[in-house]
Amino acid sequence: MGIFIIKNINILTSFDQGEFFKGDLKIDSNTGKVLEIGENLNSAGTEKQVDMSDKLVTPGLVVGHHHLYSALARGMPAPRKTPENFLETLKYLWWILDRALNENTVYLSGMAGLLGAARLGVTGVIDHHASPSFIEGSLFTLAKAFRNIGLRGMLSYEVTDRNGKDEGIRAIQENADFAKTVESDPQLNAAVGAHASFTIKDSTMDRVGVLCHDTGLPLHIHLLESGQDRTISIEKFGYDPLTRLEQRGLLREQDMIVHGVDLKPEELQKLNTLKVNLLHNPRSNMNNRVGRSSLRQGKWAIGTDGIDSDILAEVRTSFFRGREDHPPIDFSLPLKMLKRSQQILGKSQGIEISEIKKGSVADFTFFDYHSPTPLNADNFAGHVFFGLSSWAVCGTMVGGKWIMQDRKILSVDEKETSQATRLGAKALYLEMEKLQ
């Protein structure tokens, strides 16, 4: 499309401390960046004008923690034994699902999850992958789905020893191999994934630390999602999960600690001092009945943990659950967490996607939202909590290119893709039955 202008649109420049005004955006689709932002911009030299009167644009939504491999789980048969605690939920449900995945269903899970994400206005996903029966090449397969749909992403494979057979070493190698191939990719990059620490033996954890330090890659790990992580870690390894990371120098600013439900106040204070990223996943915590994280200190971002790709639903849930606290969480905190997810992904790729301004990358979410009450930067959080949601998303843009425009997916044939993912889901369920 070259250089084009979006005219007469309501612009929220940031989810935290942003400005709100009606104006124009001049975008270069070749560089993927915003050339100008303002009112009544000169259209000279542009190839196209897109009038979006009364629509709303925000920085593109980012899912700070996802499991795209669970995208085909929607509607799957219930486990044969009803889990009674968090560990049983893993054993009887999620560890069966991930073992059943093969190359085809990994790809189709990625396509299903990212297609749904694009429809929900998501422009970027930080994914944490697992498919023990298909490790080598799994991140490359998932990357193919990212490229086909067109979304931005940070990918990692979760290291674990829970299935034996040198699984942890193979997973570390997959992270390392994938990271090398995306060093110059404009939309994809890598992290080092790790499952709950109680499933990772010391020698494997040592190798994780070496890879992180040698490459500078961030660690992306589930930690203290429940108290069982602490109890089992101490029984098996003699140390609590946070100490095991600290011993290996893995509590760095770029590292991502997911869940942290069972973090003690002094542990939260330590992570806060070290400026480690924390990822809150409220709906998943509710589904797994593990409790809630304390959000009162720390660099909290927000993810869906594979429940779906609806990050605005996660933002609303975090708000209402946080209102049960005494005192309740700050009104603006959920949108700050949303911006933090954008910043984590943007910083890892050396770009600005958390604010709309001259020179920032044009990753945008568009809404068809006709508010019955005044809308401005100061009250935007109230609109998200009590009115505006993913139902209003009408467009998704990544790097100045439309992924969805006027609610129509442009990057792939949506009907054809959905037919393929439904067939993949049936095949996946058959494999799961064999493993139960």
Image: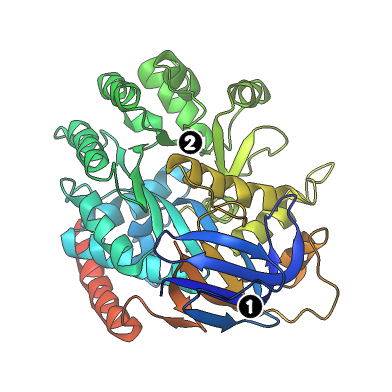
Quarter of the image for the C terminus: give it.
bottom left
**Callout 1 crowding tier (Cα within 10 Å): few <14, some 14–19, many ≥20:** many
Residue at image coords 68%, 37%: 294
As drawn, 381 above or below 184: below
Residue at image coords 39%, 66%: 114
Counting residues from the N terminus, which is met first, the one under dot 2 or under dot 1?
1
Identify the secondary structure beneath mark 1.
Answer: strand
Q: Position of residue 390 (x, y in %)?
A: 60, 72
As drawn, 56 above or below 206: below
Q: Amino acid at mark 1?
A: Lys
Q: Relative to the observer, which residue lies in front, 9 or 290?
A: 9
Relative horizontal placement of residue 193, taking residue 347 as reference (left or right): left
As drawn, 258 above or below 284: above
Q: Relative to the observer, which residue lies in front, 98 or 362?
A: 362
Identify the secondary structure beneath mark 2.
Answer: strand
Q: Amino acid at mark 2?
A: Met
Q: Which residue is mark 2?
A: 256
Tally of numbered discs: 2
Q: Residue furthest front?
A: 44
Q: Quadrant of residue 53?
A: bottom right
Q: Which residue is mark 1?
A: 7
